[in-house]
Image (cartoon, grey):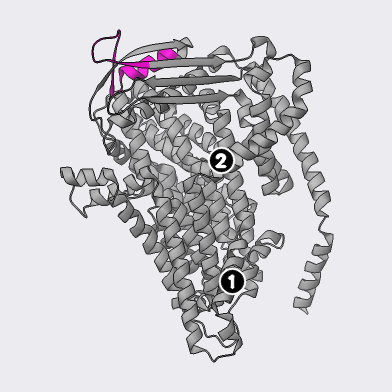
Amino acid sequence: MGLFNRRATQAQLTDRRPNPEVVLSRTLRIATLILAALLVGLWGLEQATGPDLRRSRRQLAAEGLVRDGLGRLSAPHRDARGRPRHRVVVFLDASGDAQCLKTLRTGLASHKVFQLQKASSHGARRLRGRCTLRQPPPARGSSAIELKLRLSLDGHRITGRTSFDGRQRITGYLALIPPVVAVVAALATRRILLSMLLAIFCGALVMVAGSPSRLSAPVTTRLLWLPVDVLHALWWAARHFVVGPLLAQFKLQVMIFATSLVGMIAVITRAGGTQGLLSLVGRLRGRPHLARLSVWLMGLVLFFDDCANTLVVGSAARPITDAARVSREKLAYLVDSTAAPIAGVALISTWIGFEVGLFQTTSDSLGLGVSGFEIFWQALPMRFYCLLTLGFVLATILLRRDFGPMLRAEHRATRTGQVRPDSDVDGEHSETFLEHGGPPDGLDPAWTVAVVPIGTVLVGVLGGILVLGHQTPGVQLALSEGLYGLGSTSHLRDCFTQAAKEGLQGWAMLLSGLAGSAVAMFLARRRRKTLPTGSDAHDALAWGELGRTYVSGARAIGGAIGILICAWGIQAACDALGSSVTLTAALAGNVDPTLLPLLIFATSAAIAFATGTSWGTMGILIPTVLPLAYALGGRDNPVLLYLAAGAVLDGAIFGDHCSPISDTTVMSSLSSGCNHMDHIRTQLPYAVTVMLAAAGFGYLGHANDLPLWACYGLALAALMGVLWILGKNPDTP
């Protein structure tokens, strides 16, 4: 009777679902009202800013263009490890914006490859530079600017002529339109894909209609051109913010890897592997805390890359947590809050190469005389958010305490067995292949069909990165010079570093996903030999049926892949509009040195939340805030410099955790089979709780001479207190 009532209730809910056209119309009206209010509010903020803030934006944009341009021109004069092979004497022939040219001369003065001299001489090469600044008249009421930098180095008989063309649009506070529209519209309508598409279009419209040339025109001309600008924005959004990022090599590899994993799981399920895995871990039934602990441990094992971590752990752990009645929201939180923190602090990972490279460049420009790895190592104990997050996740498991939306989700799973909420229609559709593509009658479960393909993916990703990294010119050069021995820790670490630098980890993931899929198909087909000919199980494991199962599984995550593509599109829109430059200029300034790490953490978190990328945030802020920390006291107090470094890295990861447009957050939802907005809604209170403890007792406390042991002791005590006071046992009916 209870089952009948439940089905009747679900049928009533289905009948009450609104017409898709009504939902679309309502969504567009709400989004339009939100956009209009945001435009008015952000325009008012823009008018209230002074000329100092606008100069700061221009300076940050110029520094970024100069850094990229000199890096491009000096690349032929560096060896495979990025070290200068020789000095190049240049004299500057430049014209254009005075502030940009000053930044260019400053960059050349401290450059490791180029040696600047004042006039032409024998053997000196001409470095041509042109800085162009376009901005509307002040009377137009807008501070939007576009800065262009063109550099070219006269040819050489070996390297030839090299050039660089870069531009940066800075649209002021309107640069925050894409992330704000995406977040607000998604919260208001719960239509994440439509909200993200709307945000991409708004970013393109600001890019087209907010250009300096368009803003310089009279108001009547701008109004007449508005319909054309709308059509142009649609084309711009499709071409530059969707198709452009989608064609990037690494993003294609990630999509193929995610799709192949889901197809592999579908084949494993069809061949009885999932059921065999569930029977193997049958002792976890009624013991959900052990299932959660296994997910946390799996996340620690896959420390070498966050993308591989989220996709593999979520897909592999889903049947285990489902059997133990752990909600999908909890699984997504465990996956997301373990992957990036462990990859960020691991001494061997694809992250460390990127981070150490940024630290090394900054160290060279400041003349610190220390390596980038030493800065990373010294800042490691001050990675308060990452380390506290890993500890907090473990504490929620061992203490069996949850609170807020997560507690309600866990109670739902424990009491009813529904690991997804009733409203998660997309999640139900995405797993049709698991519900209707199970093993046929007469096929016994076999855990090896699941464990062997998943193990192939794990070993393949780790081994692939090591092998591909070992083959890079940087590692081969280091081995030939005797910088380290074959198989040493330094060698393994450098393999990950160079693989990330060359973008090879994507190939390791792609090939491993395809290899795991092939192994799953082979094992499934092999089981056919043990079945009687003509039986349903025998026919279900034919090559054609297995292929259809694989394709149906891969197609099931089309919606999640669409969200991932939109997240990349919003990130591209933020880059084009200069969102990170706008936020950095607005939040930076002269502050008390004891407050600087806290401000840096907040700035980094805001940029990562708005742009959805932690690596992009690090790339913007490390060259910007580390010199500031060094000037404000880091010269005499290195702890301040290391605190600033840790605050940048951790703030980027925190903002990434909270952002609905973050690609890793989307991938965590995708692999865990969790509704994306449900994942954000349940994870946000936990991330904010850890952030407050890290900010108050960590970055603020240690900057005021509180010992590290006291910082962690007080932070852990506060977190345990929150769990004990607000939390309840999620496993009690």
Q: Where is residue 271 shown, x and y percent of the image?
A: 53, 78
Which three-letter amino acid code belongs to the residue tagged 2? Gly
Q: Residue at x 50, y 33 (%)?
A: 602
Q: What stretch is highlighted in magenta?
A: 101-127
Q: Is residue 661 visible?
A: no
The x and y percentages for residue 554 are 58, 63
Indicate the amino acid at tag 1: Thr
Q: Residue 20 carries which label?
A: none
| Label 1 crowd bin: few (<14), some (14–19), many (20+), radius 10 Å | many
Residue 280 placement, left or right of 208: left
**Residue at horizontal 43%, vertical 34%?**
619
Find out whether residue 59 is within the magenta segment: no
User: Which residue is denoted by mark 2 in the rendering?
Assistant: 244
Q: In this view, does 601 lie above or below 439?
A: above
Viewer-closest of 200 and 366: 200
Foreground of the two, 685 or 145: 145
Left or right placement of residue 274 versus residue 714 in this view: right
Question: What is the residue that sits farthest to the left in this orientation?
Answer: 482
236 w.r.t. 723: above or below: above
Kindly identify which residue carries mark 1: 549
In the image: residue 530, left or right of residue 730: left
Secondary structure beneath dot 2 equals: helix
